[in-house]
């Protein structure tokens, strides 16, 4: 099992640093995988474990702050074959 995080620090929304600041965010993720036999393996990945609301990007345009919402908690499964 692997645990990880993605951290983005705070930053100003525009170049003059006068129109606000995005506080940044920290996301936690997990991944687990297992080898089924010599050729096959499977995995599961959980992204944004805490289901934190965050902005994928933030900026200032047209006299207002603009935020692009990040993805909510998501689970992915997969199977892989190697030969």
Image: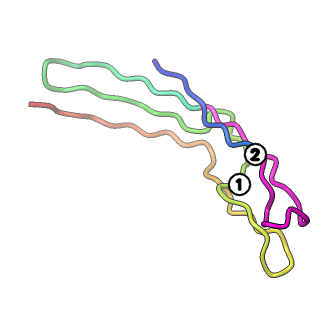
In the rendered view, tell whether residue 62 sits above or below residue 82: below
Q: In the depicted view, which residue is nearer to us: 38 or 5? A: 5
In the rendering, at what x and y percent does residue 6 appear?
61, 36
Work out which quarter of the rendered image holds the N terminus and state it.
top left
In the rendering, at what x and y percent does residue 8 appear?
68, 43
Residue 26 among magenta residues: yes
Q: Secondary structure at mark 2?
A: loop
Magenta-highlighted residues: 10-28
In the picture of the structure, the residue carrying the numbered disc 1 is 55
In the rendered view, tell whether residue 35 sits above or below residue 73: above
Write the residue at 52% across / 34% down: 46
- Determine which of the numbered discs, if any, sits on residue 24 in the image: 2
Which residue ends up furthest to the right in the rendered image?
Answer: 18
In the rendered view, tell whether residue 57 sits above or below residue 27: below
- Quadrant in the rendering for residue 13: bottom right
Pointer 2 local density, CA inside 10 Å: few below 14, some 14–19, many at least 20: some
Write the residue at 19% across / 26% down: 40
- Quadrant in the rendering for residue 67: bottom right
Q: In the depicted view, which residue is nearer to us: 67 or 61? A: 61
Q: Secondary structure at mark 1?
A: strand
Write the residue at 23% across / 34% down: 80
């Amino acid at each position: 099992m692997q645990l990880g995080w993605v951290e983005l620090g705070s930053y100003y929304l525009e170049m003059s640093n006068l129109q606000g600041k995005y506080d940044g965010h920290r996301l936690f993720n997990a991944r687990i995988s297992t080898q089924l036999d010599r050729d096959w393996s499977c995995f599961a990945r959980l992204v944004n474990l805490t289901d934190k609301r965050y902005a994928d990007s933030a900026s200032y345009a047209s006299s207002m702050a603009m935020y692009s919402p990040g993805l909510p908690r998501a689970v992915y499964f997969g199977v892989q074959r190697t030969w």
